[in-house]
Image: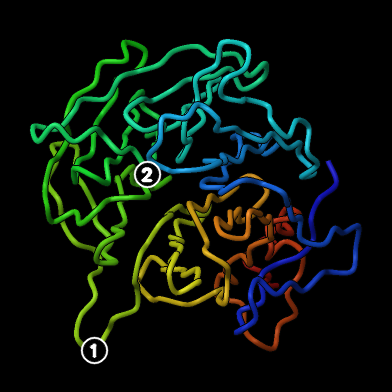
Amino acid sequence: MIRRFFYLCLSTAALCLTMLPCDMLAQITVTNLQTPYSFVSSSSGKEYFISSVNGDPDAADNNGFITKLDGNGKILNFKFIQGGTDGITLNAPKGMALVEQTLYVADLDQLRAFDMVSGKPIASISIAISPSHVPAGLTDVAYDGRGRLYCSDQHANRIYRVELPSRKVTLLVADPALAGPTGLAVHPKSGELIAVSWDKGKIFAITPDGAVSEIFSNGFFSSRFANLRGVDFDRWGNMYVSDFTTGKVWRMTWDKRFQVIAEYLPSPGDLGIDRTNNLILVPYEFAHAAEMNGLEAPSEGKSKQEKRTLADYGFIPPPPKPENGGKK
């Protein structure tokens, strides 16, 4: 695979790129999508998937589709999985998660499973209907790496847990305080479940027994977020969130420092992070497009005077440390 030697400029330009002088590709843009919602990668970083709602996000119209890209960002199949063809039902695909060779897709009140190689349907898991008889409005799905999937229900302020391989569905939490939970992610190191809020721009941590705590909420002097759509983590544990309304992507470091890494974006959706290749994947719902871009890696304490190398951006291994700490 051709490696991508570029990273996001930390400036006011929308997803501005600086390319490093080596075999390089510019940022990859996929166009002609239809209301793209989510963008995810396989654990190997050799396959990418984009879900397109293609119409009313709440309509059971069976015309949603999923686009598949190869490891270089080239389209392998624009409508790799398409509702209404080959016995496939796919209405308004939103968030996605990959578990080994299975692609799970949040689709209204169903969690649909497809083979990521062939695109053939494997299963359709029905998610419970709320007591108010409002159909579930699933927005995202996340995998914890330990045999459990989590689904967010924006309509009912609920998060469901799905046990694999039994596919048993249970309610993890139902709480109005979730304020329209949209994006979900599991911290790659701690295993903590994180949810972001559409209605109030909040970020929550949720324990295995369903206890909800706010990591960040807007205040009188700190109204950073409007309508959060996506959340994910890079390999170092930094968290990224997309704000659909303000057009920004934020990064929050382990010590809870916030930084805008891109802005003036056209409706950034349910973003994903390819931790293998150190890339950020962002769909743009109203622009009917999606982009792949490189992420800057932490400097790990390197001084401003010391020149940074490709190792700082995750593209080559770091040089070996001298014996005895470099002392003679």
User: In the rendered view, how is the structure colored?
Assistant: rainbow
Residue 107, above or below 12 = above
State which quadrant residue 276 falls in. Answer: top right
Mark 1 closeness class: few <14, some 14–19, many ≥20 residues within 10 Å? few
For the residue marked with disc 2, what is the amino acid? Val
Q: Earlier in the sequence, mark 1 or mark 2?
A: 2
State the image coordinates of residue 11 (x, y, percent, origin top left): 62, 83
Residue under label 2: 186
Q: Measuring 69% from the left and 34% from the top, which residue is drawn there?
A: 68
Residue under label 1: 221
Instruction: Kindly state the secondary structure of the residue where label 2 is placed.
Output: strand
For the residue marked with disc 1, what is the amino acid? Phe
Is label 1 in contact with label 2 (beta carbons under 8 Å)?
no
**In front of the other: 13 or 199:** 199
Q: What is the tally of numbered marks visible in this picture?
A: 2
Where is the C terminus found, in terms of image quarters?
A: bottom right
State the image coordinates of residue 173 (x, y, percent, origin top left): 14, 39
